[in-house]
Amino acid sequence: MGRVEGKVALVTGGGSGLGRADCIALAQEGAKVVVTDIDREGGEETVRLAGGDCIFLEHDVADEERWKEVIAETLKTYGKLNVLVNNAGMLIPGDVETIDTKIWRIHQQIHMDGCFFGIKYGIEAMKGNGEMCSIINVSSTTALIGYGDVFAYQACKGAIRSMSKGAATTCQDRGYTIRVNSIHPGVITTPLVTNMQAGIELPEGVEPPPPPVWGFGEPMDVGYMVLYLASDESKFVNGTEMVIDNASIIHP
Ligand SMILES: NC(=O)c1ccc[n+]([C@@H]2O[C@H](COP(=O)([O-])OP(=O)(O)OC[C@H]3O[C@@H](n4cnc5c(N)ncnc54)[C@H](O)[C@@H]3O)[C@@H](O)[C@H]2O)c1
């Protein structure tokens, strides 16, 4: 029996990096997976790599109307939703003195609006199904300690941590069988990180960050955490923050 057999999962930003690892981990353990992304090619490749019963839907997480359609399409295809991974994201480095308002707003739209819409419409879809459900919000170690050079990103990841706790409390108070947790990866080798390390598309004057002294994680280090939180093995884990960082935040 797979660890998430019979569950239906939706993963945003599933066309690359951590989202792809999540989709593969969930599909391999028996979940039906809806892979969503703005990148159709990447998303379809994930469906192919994950095998099992998966579909791809094009989806910009900053678009509230599209969220409603994607959830409706999920319910039409698979009849229910048990697991939502709010994973889609991006990062443009910059500190508080150099970041401009346009870049600040882009981060807010993708990370904060995207996560808010996901939690809101995810709860709406899950709350009546009488099954154990789990919402997993991808935050970051930047939500937990100071990093001067990723100001807008860090602000949004902090908000995602707080939103997770607020939603977990509401679900519990209302008797919904929905757990909500945030996960906090350290530096993991995905295109987001490798492009930054290589200096690709960095704003003028921003230097590539040095490699972390505690090393890089692999996407499946996060995929296994998502699998655990998606499964009923974690039924007593709720409203908390799971850090996957090889001790970087306690030993910087
Ligand atoms: N890689 C790391 O070290 C690390 C650490 C902590 C947190 N994270 C977070 O993990 C998540 C995944 O990042 P990753 O490292 O896999 O990056 P990635 O660039 O490999 O993948 C991000 C995916 O999100 C998609 N995406 C971007 N904007 C979108 C939008 N508006 N709507 C839908 N999809 C969109 C991209 O097309 C891409 O497929 C992000 O939220 C990121 O902030 C990553």
Image: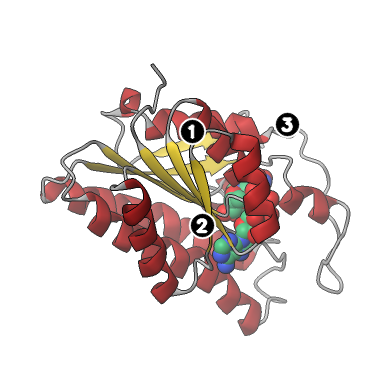
Mark 2 or 3, closer to the camera: 2
Image coordinates for residue 173, horizontal then vertical, percent: 12, 49
Against 223, residue 107 (above or below) is below
Q: Amino acid at mark 2?
A: Lys
Q: Earlier in the sequence, mark 2 or mark 1?
A: 1
Name the quadrant of the C terminus. top right
Q: Which residue is mark 3?
A: 214
| Disc ID at residue 157 | 2
Q: Residue at x 52, y 27 (%)?
A: 28
| Disc ID at residue 26 | 1
Query: In the visual, does 181 lie left or right of 145?
Result: left
Q: Residue at x 71, y 61 (%)?
A: 149
User: What's the CA distance linking mark 3 and mark 1?
Assistant: 28 Å
Query: In the visual, does 97 lie left or right of 55?
Result: right
Label 2 CA crowd tier, 10 Å (few <14, some 14–19, many 20+): many
Label 3 CA crowd tier, 10 Å (few <14, some 14–19, many 20+): some
Image coordinates for residue 17, horizontal then vertical, percent: 67, 45
Against 138, residue 229 (above or below) is above
